[in-house]
């Protein structure tokens, strides 16, 4: 018997029937003797709808009002789930983030948790009740309602698990973390376990779930995470300190991400301060630059390429053009349709030849590599956007990850 924080994502509570199913699962958790604490997201696509609504009403969309609006989605879901639990004879109380003791900074739309004063939640648990907490929300040091940002409910759940000394179950619409996206590669396999380091590399490489910030929080505070399905209710994937169970697997997972674009600046004068000038301009424009490649200098000139989120391309291009003029470079070329394919695995640290196998496999399949970057446990390559799925498929097979 212990505290289990169960977080249910938007699809898990999308309609009345789903809410009753979730209530049923929580009731079973309680019956088996665990102390359940529940965190819910807004129902279905409600967060998107509220954001859209705001954009139809207002041009300015002040942060304070946006947070009041968005957090209403989770608040609705908490009350409805509590009603469903009451129907099953399970005493349950809904809590907003503020009531649950989530103190945050004043950064609206993307607030950071400063402290979790979980006394009220602990008291509810001790009284044998199930607290149902609105995800992704808190109250700021200025006493205003705050939203923790997209995917923030995962963070709420992990923070509660750490405050209450429990484990954290993230219920979602997929049965766990897979060796790659099973919609792209049907023979992808569910992992039973993955290490925090590997999961974080996969998140950074573009794996959409779980939310990276929550995994980081969990690693920092040593909270064990279990990603699992709210549709099949089967056991999912544990994310823990230990390295992945498949000892001899060199690669644990492969992530394809086609959300980035590439900019190349040609004929850049090769002298100190030029890259600094360019990337300071990117930083000032809040551009999240990912891979950077600078070619060998020939006759005092070099090409610089970098990747960035594709949806920032239109804003960034004119900035690059201006910097190019200032530093005396030639052209700014933009490629909106690239894809980054990343292979992640702790086994890379001790096994040479992983990069060679990646390059040979892609070459054998006539897939051209445009950029390469690595970390101790990751290799990423940039390929043409329309070759992403094929690259993932052939690499998945080459590294022995296909299900038998
Ligand atoms: N509902 C919010 C979102 O979709 C927060 C969350 O559930 O994580 O981002
Ligand atoms: Mg793209």
Image (spheres, grey):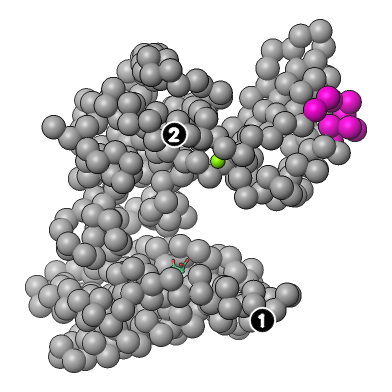
Find residue 388 and name its label: 2
Find residue 362 and name its label: none
The location of residue 188, given as percent across then percent down, is 25, 39
| Quadrant of the picture in which ligand 2 is shown | top right
Looking at the picture, does residue 20 appear above or below residue 313? below
Give the side of residue 228 with respect to residue 340, left or right: left
User: Which range of residues does the magenta coloring cover?
Assistant: 323-331
Instruction: Give the quadrant of residue 57.
Output: bottom right
- Nearest the viewer among 38 and 191 is 191
Taking the view exactly as shown, the residue that stands out farthest to the left is 32
Which residue lies under the disc numbered 1?
A: 57
The location of residue 124, given as percent across then percent down, is 29, 85
Earlier in the chain: of badge 2 and badge 1, it is 1
Give the side of residue 257 with respect to residue 281, left or right: left
**How far separated are the C-alphas under marks 2 and 1?**
39 Å
Q: Answer few, some or many: residues within 10 Å of disc 2's Cα (few below 14, many 20 plus, some between 14 and 19).
A: many
């Amino acid at each position: 018997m212990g505290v289990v924080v169960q977080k249910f994502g938007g699809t898990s509570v999308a309609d009345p029937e789903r809410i009753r199913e979730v209530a049923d699962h929580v009731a079973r958790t309680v019956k088996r003797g665990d102390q359940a604490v529940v965190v819910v997201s807004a129902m279905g696509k409600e967060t998107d709808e509220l954001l859209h609504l705001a954009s139809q009403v207002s041009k300015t969309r002040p942060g304070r009002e946006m947070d009041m609006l968005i957090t209403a989605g989770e608040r609705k879901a908490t009350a409805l789930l509590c009603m469903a639990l009451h129907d099953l004879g399970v005493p349950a109380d809904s809590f907003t983030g503020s009531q649950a003791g989530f103190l945050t900074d004043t950064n609206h739309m993307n607030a950071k948790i400063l402290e979790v004063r979980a006394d009220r939640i602990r008291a509810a648990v001790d009284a044998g009740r199930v607290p149902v907490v609105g995800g992704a929300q808190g109250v700021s040091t200025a006493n205003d309602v705050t939203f923790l940002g997209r995917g923030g409910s995962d963070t709420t759940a992990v923070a509660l698990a750490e405050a209450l000394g429990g484990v954290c179950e993230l219920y979602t619409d997929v049965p766990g973390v897979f060796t790659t996206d099973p919609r792209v590669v049907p023979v992808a396999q569910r992992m039973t376990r993955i290490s925090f380091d590997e999961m974080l590399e996969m998140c950074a490489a573009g794996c959409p779930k779980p939310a990276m910030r929550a995994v980081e929080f969990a690693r920092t505070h040593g909270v064990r995470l279990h990603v699992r399905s709210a549709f099949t209710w089967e056991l999912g994937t544990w994310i823990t300190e230990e390295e992945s169970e498949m000892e001899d697997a060199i690669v644990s997972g492969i992530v394809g991400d086609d959300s980035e674009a590439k900019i190349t600046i040609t004929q850049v004068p090769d002298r100190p301060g030029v890259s600094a000038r360019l990337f300071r301009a990117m930083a000032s424009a809040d551009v999240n630059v990912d891979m950077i490649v600078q070619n060998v200098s020939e006759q005092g000139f070099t090409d610089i390429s970098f990747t960035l989120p594709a949806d920032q391309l239109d804003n960034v291009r004119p900035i690059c053009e201006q910097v190019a003029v200032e530093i005396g470079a030639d052209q700014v070329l933009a490629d909106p349709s690239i894809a980054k394919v990343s292979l992640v695995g702790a086994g890379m640290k001790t096994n040479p030849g992983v990069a060679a196998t990646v390059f040979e496999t892609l070459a054998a399949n006539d897939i051209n590599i445009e950029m390469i970057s690595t970390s101790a446990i990751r290799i990423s390559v940039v390929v043409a956007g329309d070759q992403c799925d094929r690259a993932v498929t052939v690499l998945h097979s080459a590294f022995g990850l296909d299900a038998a």
